[in-house]
Image (tube, rainbow, N blue to C red):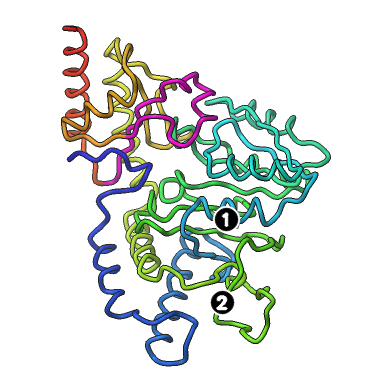
Amino acid sequence: MIYLDNSATTFPKPRVVINSVNNSFMKYGANPGRGGHQLAIRSSQIMFDSRNTLMRFFNASDENSIIFTGSCTTACNMVLKGLLKSGDHVVVSCLEHNAVMRPLQKLSENGINYTVARVYPNDNDKTLDSFRKAINQDTRLIFCIYASNVWGIKLPIDRITALAHLYGIPIAVDAAQAAGIVPIDLKESGIDFLCCAGHKGLYGPMGTGMLIFNTDIPLDTIIEGGTGSNSYSLEQPEILPDRFESGTQNLPGIVGLKASTEFIMRRGVNNIANSEMRLIQYLYDRFSKIKEVKLYTDRPESEHYVPLLSFNIEGMDSETISAMLDKYGIAVRAGLHCAPFAHEFFGTIDGGAVRVSPSMFTTRNDMDYLVNAILKIIHNLRKH
């Protein structure tokens, strides 16, 4: 199987991640922060060490600013539902994932509204101006995706963050497609709330994610319960990370995430991204010479894109293309990718698109095999 669906979740995982998860069941069998015995203390220590690793990776303020969640979607919900009140206004981009848009749709029932700012690929000035025009006197949050999970388009996050702060507005960023692919420095960028998936570009296990605080702005909770601290009180603790980590955490997943993040730090984020981008550019160049293949964006460059590519074949549905590629042993993602806004933007809402997303383990031979499979599909289509 040639796996090219890494934007959904990276596969395979580095061997060190697999080993770390397996070992965690032997070494960290107790509940972290819930006991004074040696096993619990050992579990608490590895939890702290995991936070420390991620703090260093994102240059966050301190370990306690790292809130472990089950997914990036959970983190997005925590920000939106923990911050906004009736009458508040939010600015989002036209490329947002349903991890942001569905919570906003639900919140609209309670008097919260939003404006969609248009993104102009390859023109950060126009994109920034679009966000500026979307702000009004009731705007309480800018929430935008770092990079589109469909088209790979990167938003000028640092400039949007500076704009938000100029107006005194906090910014939250969905970095599901950026973390591990794009260097993110919280102290330098100033992003207030960073939402991340652990299982994509960070190569961690499924069921891991993070909300990282880079601000003192308080959030209300969307879930309360046992934290192992202040147990005498029925009030949810105020301190981080306890306030947002009720219940037993996914310690094996978090241990795996620690290992995967350290693995990426050794490899180098830019080295991984550059390798993947060269593959996507190679694929783009080969596809551009096949008249039946429809490409939607300009040739991806690292300044404006992360390494993924969506395409279609003229006269074919994206799901059909994906199913046919599966018969050749190639795994890609087709359809709407949980991002209808992004498909409306490029006019693919009716049939979706086929997405190719490599990983650090993908080779040029894999790209050649994909192109040859597409040529065979087109050849068979012509015969009919």
Residue 30 lies, in percent from the top left, at 38, 82
Residue plotted at (38% across, 62% down): 257
Residue plotted at (56% across, 60% down): 212
Is residue 131 positioned above or below 257 on the image? above
The kind of secondary structure element at disc 1 is: helix
Segment colored magenta: 333-360
Q: Which residue is mark 2?
A: 226
Residue plotted at (61% across, 69% down): 224
Q: Label 2 is placed on what type of residue?
A: Gly
Left or right: where 336 falls relative to 329: right
Residue 141 lies, in percent from the top left, at 71, 46
Find the residue positioned furthest to the front: 109
The kind of secondary structure element at disc 2 is: loop
Quadrant location of the N terminus in the rendered image: top left
Is residue 29 positioned above or below 322 on the image? below
Q: Which residue is mark 1?
A: 186
- Between 214 and 75, the one nearer to me in the picture: 75
Mark 1 or mark 2, which is nearer to you? Answer: 2
Left or right: where 280 falls relative to 126: left
Q: Quadrant of residue 142?
A: top right
Q: Label 1 is placed on what type of residue?
A: Leu
